Amino acid sequence: MSNTDPALATWNADPLTWGHGPRVFEIFLEPTCPFSVRAFGKLDALLQQAGADRITVKLRLHSQPWHMFSGVIVRAILAASTLPGGKETAKSVMAAVAAHREEFEFAKHSGGPNMDATPNDIIARLEGYSGVALRDAFANPELDREIKWHTRYARQNGIHASPTFMVDGIVDPKLSSGDEVSLWVERLR
């Protein structure tokens, strides 16, 4: 490892996985996508209704270039997963993005007040809304391997847009962010 900072040498990204059941529900989300935000908001209810002992929910981050700050935000969420609290800290950062989505997105993907925002502005907003100090973890150059893993995994599974849902390793095009949670639970039976 080229970086000699001992704090960076021992980092680990906590997998964004909840539940421990045999049925695996993977969801590919772009954090600022309104449809992904809607799906993200249903994950706790899904675990509760389906039972954490019956399903495993795996959140995969899927950066998309038409969401202009997507790469910065995905990196920040994965950086949060390396901090104390791991996946729960990452989830709180993602929840902050969801609650304030328009402050992390461009109007019609190409304009608006965020045209003048810098990555540092975005990180500061994330820290302010989530209460999580992200800057040092975000700057870890080794974090690239975690980001690349999410990207490769999506590509290997033919994921092109978010949200996309996989059940037991197979993309299920019938599932949508607009579905009631009860429908997701039914598909997992």
Image (cartoon, rainbow, N blue to C red):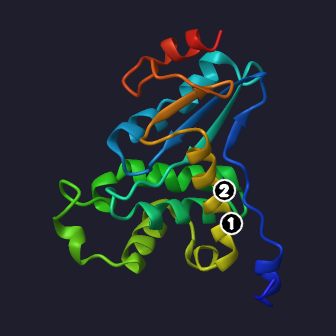
Name the side, left or right, on which 98 lies relative to 103. Answer: right
Q: Which residue is mark 1?
A: 145
* x 42%, y 40%: residue: 36
| Towards the viewer: 38 or 170 | 170
> Residue at (48%, 49%) from the top-left corner?
95
Seen in the picture, residue 87 relative to 7 is either above or below; the reply is above
Q: Which residue is mark 2?
A: 149
**Residue 127 x, y percent position in the rendering:** 48, 69
Residue 138 location, x and y as percent?
58, 74
Residue 66 relative to residue 64: left or right: left
| SS category of the residue bearing label 2 | helix
In the picture, measured across the screen, residue 62 lies left or right of residue 54, that is left
Q: Nearer the viewer, residue 126 or 141?
A: 141
Instruction: Identify which amino acid the numbered label 2 is placed on.
Output: Trp
Q: Quadrant of residue 51?
A: top right
Q: Position of residue 84 (x, y in %)?
A: 73, 62
Q: Is residue 127 left or right of residue 106?
A: right
The amino acid type, in three-letter code, at marker 1 is Arg
Q: How many marks?
A: 2
Residue 174: x and y in percent read 45, 18
Tag 1 secondary structure: helix
> Does residue 7 sit above or below 105 in this rendering?
below
**Given contact means CB atoms under 8 Å apart, are the residues at marks 1 and 2 in contact?**
yes
* Figure quadrant of the C terminus: top right
Q: Nearer the viewer, residue 145 or 42?
A: 145
Above-or-below relation of 140 to 104: below
